[in-house]
Amino acid sequence: MIWKNKTHELDQFAADLMSANPQLKYYIFGAGLMGRELLSVFMKYNCTVMFIDNSVDKQRDGIDGTEVITLTEYLLRRDGQIIIAASKANTVTIKQQLEDNLLKHGEDFFLYDEFVDFIFPIISVYGFNQSYVSLAQITLTERCTLKCKKCAHGCSYVDNASAIDMTLQQVYKSADSFFSKVDFVKEFVLIGGEPLLYRELEIVIEYIGRRYRERISLFVITTNGTIIPNKDILKACQKYNILFRISNYSYQVPRLKKTYQRLMDVLESYSISYVLSEEEHEWMDYGFEYVNRNESEDELVKVFDACKTPCREIRENRFYYCVMARSISDNLGFHVGQDDYLDMDRLNGTDYRKELLEFTLGYSDKGYLDMCRHCNGAEAKNYPIPAAEQVIRNDA
Ligand code: SF4
Ligand code: SF4
């Protein structure tokens, strides 16, 4: 979207949103892991929040001190909006259940991703004067222990022997820039490449944890599970309650099953939380290496607007809308889109939170990224490819 009325683009939408739920009262439908994540965000903002869940046990015991009610009880009150916090399959069932009770999507209830990525950032700024980002990442290194042919960050093109990681000073600057303008982030992720290759990882965790942990709901390391962290890293992760998200590529690389088990055992011995993803069989092909759209700027804006990728990246003072666009451009040597970021150091106006909000939701002067010309965008789902297919066998 092209900025036409910077810092006022969302005024009307926000006003409608707030008037639909003036008490900012929320019901989370689904008292599982996603529901608890959302609960921790609402608690930070002192919102009134309850769960709806079909489980009789949860209705009896509550969750983390929060009341759990039935949908029937909610229907008698109807004094707040529902957010469905469930797996994809369960979301379909719950959505149908709500619609059968004449509740309207977008008015009475929201889906999880649309709420955390789009609705809540607006409520946070307009209702609480707090800037909120759903997901942001620091790419510590582009080096990786695997070489996935279609890595969406282009890390398989990186030479591990010669690639240069971010310096500690650059990482500090990235965190400081980000938190100088962002009051709260739902998920703050250290990624790569493989972030456990970063030599000073425990120092990074300590730096960010000590200064900013209170402003992060989920502090995450996303790993491919090939490396067992050393004791210093494990202690830092334990201290700052880091969650390990372990990508599961064992379908393509069966030997990884054993490594995942070893990693999970070690994390458990330190009481560190982790989530091992479902075995990944298929990825979408963004086509960065071969797509070259000969399209007008208007068409590129449409490509960008349809995409809605949630993955922001902070790299020193530069806040990138699309981590894939930045990393692919660098790692494949495209040198495209060097100016496609928001400069956090120059974001100093009185309405900077609204400018940041609009950028985070997809507004910019140009309305698209240069790399969108080389990307299948939302159409990528129509180009399935094998997940994590390796360029070469790797014994890491
Ligand atoms: S594990 Fe594969 S997809 Fe992940 S960063 Fe490494 S090369 Fe890329
Ligand atoms: S369409 Fe643009 S914003 Fe979306 S993934 Fe591709 S490069 Fe990133």
Image (spheres, rainbow, N blue to C red):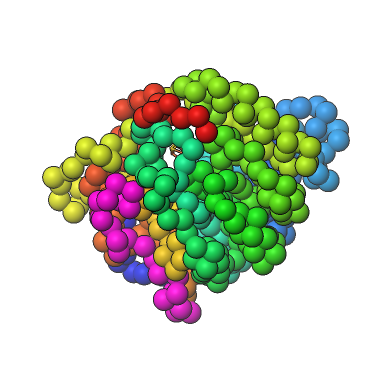
Q: Position of residue 208 (x, y in %)?
A: 63, 62
Q: Is residue 192 above or below residue 248?
A: below
In the rendered structure, the answer to whether residue 105 lies left or right of residue 45 reads left
Could you tell me which quadrant the N terminus lies in? bottom left
Nearest to the observer: residue 23 or residue 183:
183
Q: Where is residue 287 in the image (x, y as percent from the top left)?
A: 28, 36
In the rendered structure, the answer to whether residue 187 lies left or right of residue 76 reads left
Q: In this view, does 223 lie above or below 120?
A: above
* Residue depicted at 56% across the width and 26% down the height: 256
* Residue depicted at 64% across the width and 50% down the height: 218
Count of all numbered marks drawn on residues in the image: 0
Q: Is residue 325 visible?
A: no
Q: Is residue 273 above or below residue 387?
A: below
Specify the farthest residue to the right: 61
Q: Can residue 150 be seen in this view?
A: yes
| 253 drawn magenta | no
Nearest to the observer: residue 312 or residue 54:
312
Nearest to the observer: residue 300 or residue 320:
320
In the rendered structure, the answer to whether residue 290 lies left or right of residue 99 reads left
Q: Where is residue 69 in the image (x, y as percent from the top left)?
A: 77, 36
* Residue depicted at 57% across the width and 53% down the height: 199
Q: Position of residue 288 (x, y in %)?
A: 28, 41
> Which picture quadrant has residue 204?
bottom right
Span highlighted in magenta in the image: 329-350
